[in-house]
Amino acid sequence: MSQNDATVAAAPGQPASHTRKMLWVLLLVYVLNFLDRQIVNILAEPIARDLVLDDAAIGLLTGLAFALFYTFLGIPIARYADKPTTNRVGLISISLAVWSGMTVLCGMAQNFVQLLLARIGVGVGEAGCTPAAHSLITDAVEPAKRSSAIAFYGLGIPIGSLLGLIIGGFVNDLWGWRIAFMVVGVPGILLAAVLPLMIREVRHRGPATQTAGVSAPEFTALGSLKEVFGTRAFVYIAIASSVTAFLGYGKGVWALILFQRSHGLSAGQTGLLLGVALGVAGIIGTWLGGYLADRFGKVDRRHMLTTPAVGMAIAAPILFLGYWVGEWHVAIALLFVPTILNAAYYGPTFACVHGLVRPQARAMASAVMLFLQNLIGLGLGPLLFGIASEMLKPSVGVESVRYVLYGAAWLGLIPAFFFWRASLRLNAELKSG
């Protein structure tokens, strides 16, 4: 994506140069967000050996411990971010400092309980980032370009995950998993100190404030939730994205373990090979989903969700083959295209969600989506995948992870169906502003 693509189209009263700078800075924040969140995936196997953990404990550490606090704190923090007097940039800066500091503490943990508490701290910090960032972006960008803008921010997911796999695996092979946590945590602490000097709160810009809808009456907390759940399209999108997250987070942890256990790669090799291949695929898919949603959504707003609906249906059988083959290089090649197709949902999903509510409820809309995605996806995905793996071990041994991933591949048809159902409601339920 070029720098001009990142500019998109600023909302009235918002200078294009400020919008461009804001998007790039928020992208960097989100890269660090997912780097710190996902690095534990590539380190799970070394941590398990060092602290003597079973697969269920790995699932708890990589998923539920983070997700519980991330999801439940996200709603009140989003409510705070939606208030006209809140400085969302300051909120993001504080959140960045907290989760980065807690990532450093993960590296200092000497036992499972200490590491669990530090991971909870990472979740507490990260709860304040994305709802506020989504709200900032939506206020600064005109509706016709919001899918692309939110997708650009969403590139932080594959980029951060890619860097987490590469850096985590490389540093682990050289100096161990504790040093890996410290290496990725420190940059966020430094960025948090200067973030308020790099971008400004768009509500304080005069004309943009009116564009953002701040002058409209403020919702109560219950009113915000009623606004969010007031359309059938939102319910369908929430189901689709929650199942997508459940499968994505589960596969994100256990596919890495599959390549180490069944294909015999080291953590460093897995992080580099799988990280680069799937990271690049995720970047392509995230950008492509936003681009196609904006381009074809102009013709018919139903097409904002066509790419994730059709793409996930196509991805399922290819993904199954990727988990089935015995040669690791063939497996990585087969996982490339499904990763592109499964990553295309991010921009269209959140752009649609913001279009289904009024401006005063946008951060809340993101927070509700993230609540469902992370509680169901990040909280239960790695954990239930791990429990299922433990249950299958007596019958299939070390290949238990592979069999769990077989099922995950075909379950991708569920979100494909619900994205299609949501698309049928968009023309009737999307708002114009």
Image (cartoon, helix red, strand yellow):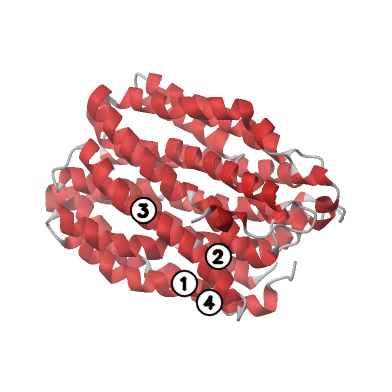
Spot occupied by residue 89 in the image (x, y as percentages of width and height): 68, 38
Q: Considering only order in the chain, which callout, 2 or 3, is on the residue closer to the N terminus? A: 3
At horizontal 57% and vertical 45% (from top left) the residue drawn is 24
Please determine whether, in this image, residue 22 is positioned above or below residue 182. Answer: below
Mark 4 in CB contact with mark 3 (< 8 angstroms): no
> From mark 4 to mark 3, how far is it between C-alphas?
29 Å
Label 4 CA crowd tier, 10 Å (few <14, some 14–19, many 20+): some
At horizontal 60% and vertical 81% (from top left) the residue drawn is 300
Determine which residue is flagged by label 4. 421
Side of 70 relative to 248 (left or right): right
Secondary element at image label 4: helix
Marks 1 and 4: which is nearer the front?
A: 1
> From mark 2 to mark 4, how far is it between C-alphas?
14 Å
Marks 2 and 4: which is nearer the front?
A: 2
Quadrant assignment, res 141: bottom right
Secondary element at image label 2: helix
Which mark is on residue 307?
1
Side of 131 relative to 339 (left or right): right
Mark 2 in CB contact with mark 1 (< 8 angstroms): yes
Instruction: Name the foreground residue: 70 vs 23.
Output: 23
Label 2 CA crowd tier, 10 Å (few <14, some 14–19, many 20+): many
At horizontal 87% and vertical 53% (from top left) the residue drawn is 215
Determine which residue is flagged by label 3. 280
Label 3 CA crowd tier, 10 Å (few <14, some 14–19, many 20+): some
Side of 290 relative to 131 (left or right): left
Instruction: Name the foreground residue: 412 vs 141.
Output: 141
* Three-letter code for the amino acid on which mark 1 is drawn: Thr
Q: Considering only order in the chain, which callout, 1 or 2, is on the residue closer to the N terminus? A: 1
Mark 2 in CB contact with mark 4 (< 8 angstroms): no
Quadrant assignment, res 282: bottom left
